[in-house]
Image (cartoon, helix red, strand yellow):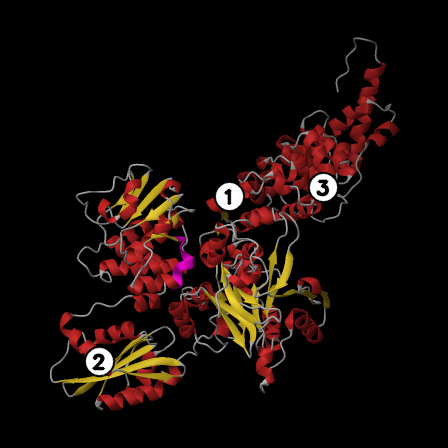
Amino acid sequence: MRLVITHEQPDFDAVASAALVTVLFPGSVVALPGTLRGSVGELLKLYRDQVPLVAGEDVDLADVSELIVVDTAERSRLGRFQSLLTRVPVTVFDHHPEPSDPVPGSRGLRDAVGATVTLLVRQLEAAGVTLPPALASLALLGLHEDTGDLTFDHTTPDDHRAAAWLLHQGANLEVLRRFRSAALPPELGGLRDRLLTEAVTHEVAGRSVVTAHFRSHDYVPSASGLANALLDETRADAVVIAARMDDRTLVFARSGSRVDVAGALQSAVGGGGHRRAAFARCDCEPEGALALVLEALPRFIDAPLRARDVMSAPVTTVAATATLAEARQALARHAHNGMPVVGELGDLVGVISRRDLDHALRHGITDAEVEGFMTRPAITATPDTTLRELERLVLRHDVGRIPITAEGALVGIVTRSDLIRARHPGADLRAPAERVLASLPQGARRVLDLAASLAGDDRLYLVGGTVRDGLLGVGYVDLDLVVERVPWSSLEGTRGGDRAAAPGASALGRALQRALGGSLAVHGDFGTARLRLDDELVIDIASARAEAYPTPGALPEVRASSLVDDLARRDFTVNALAVRVHPGPADLIDPFSGLADLEARRLRVLHPLSFVEDPTRLVRGARLAGRLGLRFDDDALAKARAALRPEVLTNVSGQRLRGELELTLAEPRVAPALRQLVVIGAMAPLYGLEVDLHALERLDDAAREAPRRGEPDAAPGAAAALMVLLCATPDEAAARAFERFHWPKRLWTQRERVRALAASDVAATDERLEALDVGSRPALAALAPDLAHKVAAFEHAPGRPRVRGRDVVRLGLAAGPSVGAVLDALESARASGEVDSYEAELALARTLVERQRRRETSPAGDETST
């Protein structure tokens, strides 16, 4: 075990640094003291699932093979882990001055910067790592804490650069304000305490707004800091303070992301500033100013996020009568950390967590029923519960998931991860969403707008490759839509609501077909529909779903689920992007940091077993990487090689592999995609084929629109690329590939002809070139560059009759090698331009035949020049 530790009573910098180390060193585990108090403890209750944490007292020291120490170099601050310092390799990351009893670390980094986070950000940035926004927020919080919000004397330029990088990674400043108390001049401490006592909390449009006022005969410097202090202390959505000083009333306002205090102050008393920080002066009394601001605020407050906006649905449950072993298998299969427990009638009776199951299983308890180990009663909420109330429930009860119920029915679940995603939607995601929609042609946009108008209560998203390619500005092929059902909408309808019925994927497809025409195919088992319009626009519609693979390489089992689950089942993060188009406004949904990977041109898998579950994803990834200039990251490369074991590949059908290869060979440029397969070592295990990259590059560079003598134009590039692969592969391996992938026998005949010509075993005569099909001739030119000019002359020849072998025979030359000699001479004459018509060819052929006949009939030893 590679263990990450820090000093006792860790602060935010220590915790954040430990979390960042797990990104630099995948597989590491962080050990922290069992009880963390104050803001650090509260933060970790929400962020526990973002860091691989274990309690320090639970670590078996005999299992530790490597130790990483962060934010301290003092041996005496490591507690029971001091005994490891002389037994295992030690790495230290610390920014403090060297102590008198330093930790004897031989690796790591120590530097006099403002925070240990800064040292680790250097490493992460140099490695091209993309952080999840949640970890970026935690790191920024640690950096601000140790540098006094970048104001302490020991703050360095590197700290400022690190803060900027973390903001680029999506760090959320609201988290910073919430968990860190802003510095306030000591002389204002008493006034702050008084205001906290006298402050009044109002609920305005579902948001908490704190107001306070005071009077002072003298001007109070740094009074704006009081608003920051009250915002931090009260954790309200907004704070407004009115102060009467120098016969004027000054109004200071601070807020979170959902309240536009600048707009409210501007409307109420003529102030201004930023959305979250505003200031105004007015002549009215403080109480009157506050009343005016409170009256204006509702128009400048975003509706609060509620459970219905962030919950996952439908909910995966486990029966109370299931065994602990069965419950643990269900958690592993669905990648959950816990599940609601239901009784015989489907009623919610409790919640079971992975931690509870693991404790029981470690003691050998496997056959006991879940009912005896679950937590009861379950802490629940309703669809109308606000995000802040949900967070309070998590903090108060220290639970990782909250079932959402409506009229006694289980309609959804909110986990810590859902809360984290709601707080970390990413930096400025609205603009990318608008960019994607703006990239759509007008006709496609009209179809999308129509689909949104027909979605009713359901949520409608543009997803996958359409979003990815729109962000890259490389166009699109079709529209991919996902419909997310809202299970509680029907319950609202029974209470008198007049909302439209939720259509689902198949019904939405039928509604679009009625409005637009076209042909519709519905696949009910998979919850999908495909509408092909008369103008060839294809709209793929799917109900949000999750999938599980019963065995590696097998087809997945599908069940209805949420958008996040639907995105999570995809292969790569750059494909797990969505734009919400209904209800508006448009917003980019990026739960797996796919946008950052796209900007870094990085191909990153979503799941550790992604390639094992479906090895054909390797080919799709190589195709995507080659087309868009992406690269597999190191983790994806490692996972790819692990998936290429024979026991994994045995379940993958040759038909599926052949289909993926044919799609790859049909790419506009084949070499980049196949180069990726070579890099990950996949061509031999998957296909048993060898790759001549130089030939493929020559093939890519050749003109694809050259005339083909009487041959169809269908995908000549794909056929040529396949022929290059087949010719580059030795006979025995090629024969096995032909058998597995059921390629037609005529391809084997073509392969033999191309290989013979490329090896110069036979002359490249027009007759032999004529015998090659539309894909084999360009393959020959790519494999044997010295024959490229002959192939080009043949390919570009006018559509006229040529002198063939049968013509030479008719001129009086017996069939045999002499005919070949004449045809070779004719080919050279064509290539040099000596002949440019059938008549000229025929005249030269007569001359050559006559010379050949004279040679054959002349006495022995007589030589006739040809």
User: Marks 1 and 2, Cα distance to the nearest angstrom?
Assistant: 57 Å
- Circle 3: element type: helix
Residue at position x 77%, y 28% from top?
823
- Among numbered discs 1 and 2, the one appearing first in the sequence: 2
Quarter of the image for residue 109 reads top left
User: Which stretch did the figure color magenta?
Assistant: 46-53
- Given residues 818 and 747, the one toward you in this image is 747
- Given residues 534 and 768, the one toward you in this image is 534
Question: Which image quadrant: the N terminus?
Answer: top left
Q: Which mark is residue 637?
A: 1
- The residue identified by callout 2 is 195
Left or right, 736 with respect to 369, comes to right
Q: Position of residue 734 (x, y in %)?
A: 69, 33
Given the image, on which type of amino acid does mark 2 rest? Leu
Given the image, on which type of amino acid does mark 3 rest? Phe
Q: Is residue 721 above or below residue 510?
A: above
Q: Which mark is residue 517?
A: none
User: Marks 3 and 1, Cα distance to the nearest angstrom?
Assistant: 26 Å
Residue 406 belongs to the span the image colors magenta: no
Query: Which secondary structure type mostly characterizes the magenta part of the structure?
Result: helix
Given the image, on which type of amino acid does mark 1 rest? Leu
Residue 49 belongs to the span the image colors magenta: yes
Q: Nearer the viewer, mark 3 or mark 2?
A: 2
Q: Is residue 837 visible?
A: no
- The residue identified by callout 3 is 741
Quarter of the image for residue 562 reads bottom right
